[in-house]
Structure formats: structure tokens, C-alpha cells
Amino acid sequence: MTRILVIEDEAPLREEISDILMFEGFDVLTAENGKLGLEMALHETVDMIVCDITMPEMDGYQVLLNLRHDTKSALIPFLFLTARADKAFMRHGMELGADDYVTKPFTHGELLSAIRSRLNRHLAIAEAHQIDLEQAKTQLTRLVTHELRTPLISIRMVRDVIERQMNHLGPDEIQDLMDTLRSGTERLNHRSEERRVGKECRSRW
């Protein structure tokens, strides 16, 4: 079940959003201020965050900045709620890493449309990223299986994947790539050692 964290200091609005989302089948967590919301986002499994901007303890901008600087939460879709609709104000939030805005007051349909749009886009990006990653790993494994002439090719392959996916790779995926590279270089080192020993044996004869 998709879990959405709602960070909103106005209790009536927070409860209304929570009711709307739960009625639509989402699992909902709520926080009454930015500080509490940030703690929940960092310690709970969350698929999306809907956050007000002007709040006590910590405003929405600070919440977003902290989340984007943490590898575990950097890619969580983030939707701002705001009573302001001027372009400069919205642009600032987008530059910080927000995925979208919903301007207060909003209808149920507008809120749900924005949430589903962001979730679908995030899913599509994640699927495309996974396909790219799997293809790169398959290609790397194929090259290693055919005994690359030099470990440099493996290193370049991993480097290219990391450069392309820098903002999407998680710690586990990076470790997976490094394990693949390590396996390849160990195989190459083993083959190199076998050849060296073979040459030494032949020179003796």
C-alpha cells in the first residue's frame, strides 16, 4: 500500500487531507509541524510527502532541504501546499527539489490528480532507471565473462553507470555495482596470474 506523509500545521486541513487519501486507499501518516514531519520522513517508509510551507518549528523549505540532502529520502516525491501562487515563489521551491505545488484552496480532485501524477512519474522513472541499471549490469557481466583484456574497461563501465544514474542510485545499488566490478577484476587478476605462471613454466622448459 502506498504510504503518504502529510505535514500540515492546520489541524482541520490536515485531517481533511488525511481523510481524502485514506478514502482513496492510501496509507497515511500525519505530522503537525515541519520538525516532526522531517523526523517521520527519515525514520518511516514513505512513498510521498505532501507538505505545507509556512509552519512552526520548521517550514516546508527546510524540510525539503534536509530530505534532499539525505540519501535515504532524496528521491521521495515531494508536493508543496501553499496559499501563494506567484511564479517566483513556486520557482524557489522547485529549485530546492520540490516535484509539484497545489495551491490552497484546492478541490479533492486537484489534490488527488497532483498526487497520482507525481507517483506515476516517480514509478516510471524508477522503472526506467532499473531497466538501465540491469542492462548495464548485464553488459558488464557479459564483458567480464568473455575475459576482458583489461580491468580498465570494467572500471569505465561502472563509472558510466554511476555518472548516468548519480541522482537515482541508492547505497544498495552502488554496492551491487561495486560487487560486480570486484568480481570482474578478481577474475581478470586470476586469469592474469594463470598466464604469468604458464609463461614461467614454458620458459623453464
Image (cartoon, helix red, strand yellow):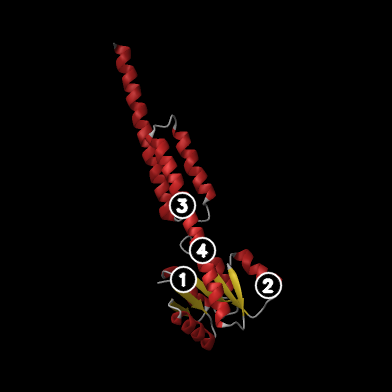
CB-based contact (under 8 Å), mark 3 and mark 4: no
Q: Nearest the camera: 136 or 183?
A: 136
Q: Is residue 167 above or below residue 37?
A: above
- Amino acid type at circle 3 is Ile
Tell me which label, 3 or 4, sits earlier in the chain: 4
Real-space Cα distance between discs 3 and 2? 36 Å
Sequence-earlier tag: 1 or 3: 1
Q: Is residue 11 visible?
A: yes
Look at mark 1 in the image and give the residue it sits on: 41
Say what amino acid the circle numbered 1 marks: Ala
To which quarter of the image does residue 87 belong?
bottom right
- Measure the C-alpha gap from mark 1 to mark 3: 27 Å
Q: Which percent across, then down, holds residue 204?
A: 30, 12
Left or right of 195, for residue 38: right
Instruction: Pick the quarter of the image with the N terminus.
Output: bottom left
Q: Mark 4 Cα within 10 Å, few/some/many (few <14, many 20+)?
A: some
Residues at marks 4 and 2, CA–CA distance in whole angstroms: 24 Å
In the image, residue 171 above or below residue 112? above
- Disc 3 marks which residue? 131
Q: Residue, x 46% and y 62% (percent of image)?
A: 72
Going by the numbered disc 2, the residue's amino acid type is: Phe
Q: Secondary structure at mark 1?
A: helix
| Residue where numbered disc 4 is placed | 122
Question: Which mark lies nearer to you, 1 or 3?
Answer: 3
Residue 164, numbered circle: none
